Image (cartoon, rainbow, N blue to C red):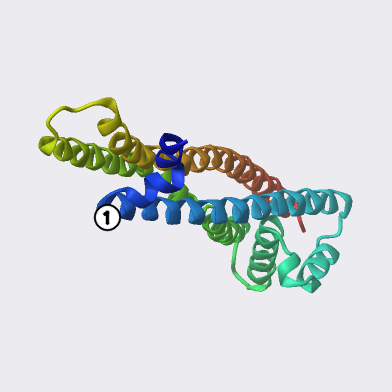
């Protein structure tokens, strides 16, 4: 019972050296932040997929671009998705250039595509926010935990210098304390890597849908009188 208590998780953390405890605290903070961003991106990407599908359905069902723009501009800003903002930016630029005299059709379409491209870049920056943090956590956390482990093992063996006969009972607690840091590093890294890969894939698919819509919308505008 005494050995079990001495090797409990809480006991190992409380008896670790100050540097190892600092490493564990840093990993715990990073893990909590990564989980916060994981849930934020989960709901944000899911919401963006829903808004994109809804606007695509509305766009192909409504042949009148003016009516569609009025519906889009009249919607609440929080209810507008990235695809809807790309459409609005392109349509506004197209109408503005069409009203100018002396502007040929190629210049009108070039300006429209640039407006949609600028909005596309802003929306992609918004969707990709916090992904770099998840990537950093996934790549760095195991090494931070390994650093804490190496330091803890060094202290454990240094403590054996004053022991006449080293046994497993003397070595086990120190090594177990050190290995907790590696476990916490992996605990922080694995969810961050899985979430990053999943969200990067989802954002790439959304980007493909945005680019395809921009090309199709440009073709429709090019046929406008």
- Please indicate whether residue 195 sits to the left or right of residue 134 in the image: right
Observer-nearest of 15 and 105: 15
Observer-nearest of 163 and 206: 163
The 10 Å Cα crowd at callout 1, few under 14, some 14 to 19, many 20 or more, is few
* Residue at (68, 53) in percent of width and height: 43
The C terminus lies in quadrant: bottom right
* Residue at (34, 41) in percent of width and height: 177
- Please indicate whether residue 9 sits to the left or right of residue 44 in the image: left
The mark total stands at: 1
* Residue at (18, 38) in percent of width and height: 154
- Please indicate whether residue 17 sits to the left or right of residue 195 in the image: left
Residue 206, image x, y percentages:
64, 45
Name the residue that disc number 1 marks. 18
Residue 178, image x, y percentages:
31, 39
Badge 1 element: helix
Up/down of 65 relative to 49, above or below: below
Whether residue 130 appears in this view of the structure is: no
Whether residue 44 appears in this view of the structure is: yes
Residue 184, image x, y percentages:
42, 42
């Amino acid at each position: 019972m005494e050995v079990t208590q001495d090797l409990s998780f809480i006991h190992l953390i409380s008896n670790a050296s100050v540097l190892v405890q600092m490493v564990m605290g840093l990993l715990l903070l990073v893990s909590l932040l990564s989980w916060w961003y994981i849930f934020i991106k989960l709901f944000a990407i899911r919401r963006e997929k829903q808004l994109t599908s809804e606007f695509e359905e509305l766009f192909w069902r409504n042949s009148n671009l003016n009516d569609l723009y009025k519906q889009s501009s009249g919607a609440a800003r929080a209810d507008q998705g990235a695809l809807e903002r790309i459409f609005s930016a392109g349509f506004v630029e197209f109408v503005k250039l069409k009203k100018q005299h002396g502007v040929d059709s190629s210049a009108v379409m070039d300006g429209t595509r640039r407006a949609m491209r600028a909005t596309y870049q802003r929306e992609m920056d918004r969707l990709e926010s916090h992904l770099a943090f998840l990537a950093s956590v996934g790549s760095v956390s195991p090494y931070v935990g390994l650093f804490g482990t190496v330091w803890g093992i060094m202290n454990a063996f240094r403590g054996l210098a004053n022991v006449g006969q080293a046994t497993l009972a003397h070595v086990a607690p120190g090594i177990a304390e050190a290995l907790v840091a590696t476990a916490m590093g992996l605990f922080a890294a694995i969810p961050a890597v899985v979430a990053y890969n999943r969200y990067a894939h989802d954002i790439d698919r959304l980007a493909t849908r945005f680019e395809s819509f921009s090309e199709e919308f440009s073709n429709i505008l090019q046929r406008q009188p």
